Amino acid sequence: EHKHTIEEIRYVERGVDWLDVRDIRDNWVRIEMTTGDMAILPSNTYHRAVFRQ
């Protein structure tokens, strides 16, 4: 789990990955991302990537 002081762009070139993001209540929200998906994380957003095979 980490955060950045600038926004982050995540793009899935191929396959399936999960992106976990903390919400405003400090709960983890899991987002399944598949080929071609893009996510833009605002600065200071706690997140972690879970890579699937």
Image: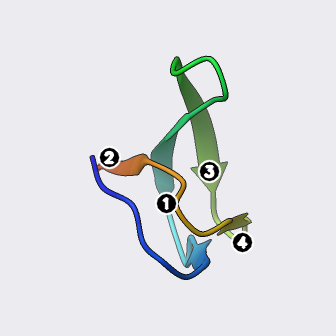
- Confirm or deny contact between disc 1 and disc 4 (CB under 8 A): no
Q: In the image, residue 3 lies at what x, y percent?
A: 39, 61
User: Which label's residue is closer to the chain start, 2 or 3?
Assistant: 3
Q: Tag 2's secondary structure? A: loop
Q: Residues within 10 Å of mark 3 (few under 14, many from 20)?
A: some
Residue 28, percent from left and from top: 49, 23
Reading the image, the residue beneath label 2 is 52
Residue 7 in the image: x percent, y percent? 61, 78
The residue at which mark 1 appears reads as 15
Point out the tag, 4 or 2, that comes first from the N-terminus.
4
Q: Nearer the viewer, mark 3 or mark 1?
A: 3
- The first of marks 3 and 1 along the sequence is 1
Asked if marks 4 and 3 touch (Cβ < 8 Å), the reply is no
Q: Amino acid at mark 4?
A: Gly
Q: Residues within 10 Å of mark 1 (few under 14, many from 20)?
A: few
Q: Earlier in the sequence, mark 2 or mark 1?
A: 1
| Disc 2 + disc 1, Cβ < 8 Å | yes
**25 to 17, vertically: above or below:** above
Q: Looking at the picture, does residue 4 appear above or below residue 52?
A: below
Q: Residue at x 49, y 60 (%)?
A: 15
Report the residue at 56% width, 70% height from top.
Answer: 12
Q: Amino acid at mark 2?
A: Arg
The amino acid pointed to by label 1 is: Gly
Residue topped by disc 3: 33
